[in-house]
Image (cartoon, rainbow, N blue to C red):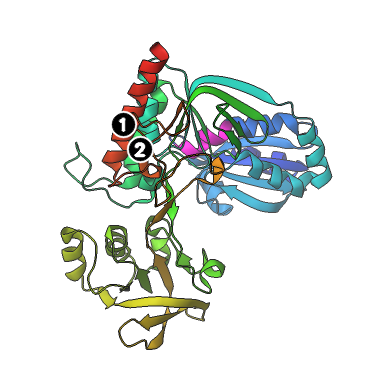
Amino acid sequence: MREISSKEFEKEVLQGGKVVLDFYSTECPPCEALAPKFESVAELFTDDAKFFKIFRQENRDLSEKLSVKGSPTVLFYEDGKEVGVRLSGGIRRHDLFEGMKALVGKERVKEVRDKIKPIVSEYDVAILGGGPGGLTAGLYLCQAKINTALIDIGLPGGNVATTHMVSNYPGFIDPQPGYMLSHYMSEQTKQCGTTYKVAVDVTHVDLEKKEIVIDEFETIKAKKIIIATGTSPNYLGVPGEKELKGNGISYCATCDAKYFVDKEVIVVGGGNSAIEEADFITKFASKVTIVHQFDKLQANKTAQEKAFNNPKISFMLEHEPRGFQKSKKGVKVEVEDLKTKERKEIDTDGAFIFVGLKPNLDLFNNKLELDDWGYIKTNEDKETSIKGVYAVGDVASKKYRQITTAIADGTIAAISITRELDK
């Protein structure tokens, strides 16, 4: 594998037979996460295809010509024509194997995968999850010279990375973009020395044995495990919601608001997330209608005042969605008036849903003691019902879930583990 420039593109790529091309950028965490995976897959398929990297920032004309709009972006070529599906963002090792199927076929990919030798990596602590709680734990542990691996199925940052602005984080006079606050935390922990294994598939977790299998071939063994897997958005559970997810229905304003310039959208929910994200969406959309089941909003007073004073925002209180359908405009939403039981349809360009969160616990096979709401119970040291396993951040049982409370959890768990290991 080697790096090429746009001058070599025609000869090496368009005339090169089977080729895999990675457009990367500097100061790009997803690019850094992809690099070792790309290199390892290149070694596995060295007899099947050529693998090249190209620096996107110095080859802008080619990037624009190929409509490469983000870094990293991986393209697959055969005899000068692009094949398969483009990969971008937090690219997993599994994604690269799927992409190779378009070049060399499913049987060849299976043959290569079957020859991969499993490896075992040993650490003092393994952290599952890269949100504020996990990143803080990693920072404290690496500063204590404890060999730590941070594992995440996505990229570090957690839900903070998809929050457009954070105005209540201590130390910053002005509100901070969520992705930048996540970036600062992530880079600090990485530079300290925590090993990052991100954008991976976590295929098995054994909490008793303290073993985590990633990408089906690497087993990570640790003395202690910190669970920091966070939460995911709740669904309304009404007809059409699942079918239109990502095709008119979104759960992330930071990700998708930019696609609704001068459009009309609805926002479902009345808590802090719903109201703050609705305000953000008005930077793009021409009209935002908030649909909320209660007669009052549950968001903090500052957020409420801002929303009530925003001329682009209107409210449908004491209403609930009952179903979604695709329409020519975008999405047709059936809503019910909870007072009169009357139903009506709203034809809108898109819908954003913010109705709470649920803990991410699917990896743990009901092995942990949970509270009545499904969150992990811990003691004052953040240790769970399983010895040597800790839980921090939003996945843990607590009264309040904020960035600052997650950071506090990570601090407590890391100090507790450090003292345990020092014994």
Q: Is residue 340 visible?
A: yes
Residue 263 percent coordinates (x, y): 38, 73
Q: Is residue 153 magenta?
A: no
Residue 399 percent coordinates (x, y): 28, 47
> What is the magenta range?
28-35
Looking at the picture, tell me which residue is in the foreground, 42 or 271: 271
Quadrant assignment, res 119: top right
Looking at the picture, tell me which residue is in the foreground, 47 or 92: 92
The residue lying at 38 percent from left, 59 percent from top is 253
Residue 169 percent coordinates (x, y): 23, 42
The CA distance from mark 2 to mark 1 is 19 Å
Left or right: residue 59 versus residue 342 is: right
**Residue type, label 2:** Pro
Give the class, few, some or many, for how many residues have Cα within 10 Å of label 2's Cα (few <14, many ≥20): many
Give the class, few, some or many, for how many residues have Cα within 10 Å of label 1's Cα (few <14, many ≥20): few
Q: Give the residue at mark 2.
A: 132
> Majority secondary structure of the magenta segment?
helix
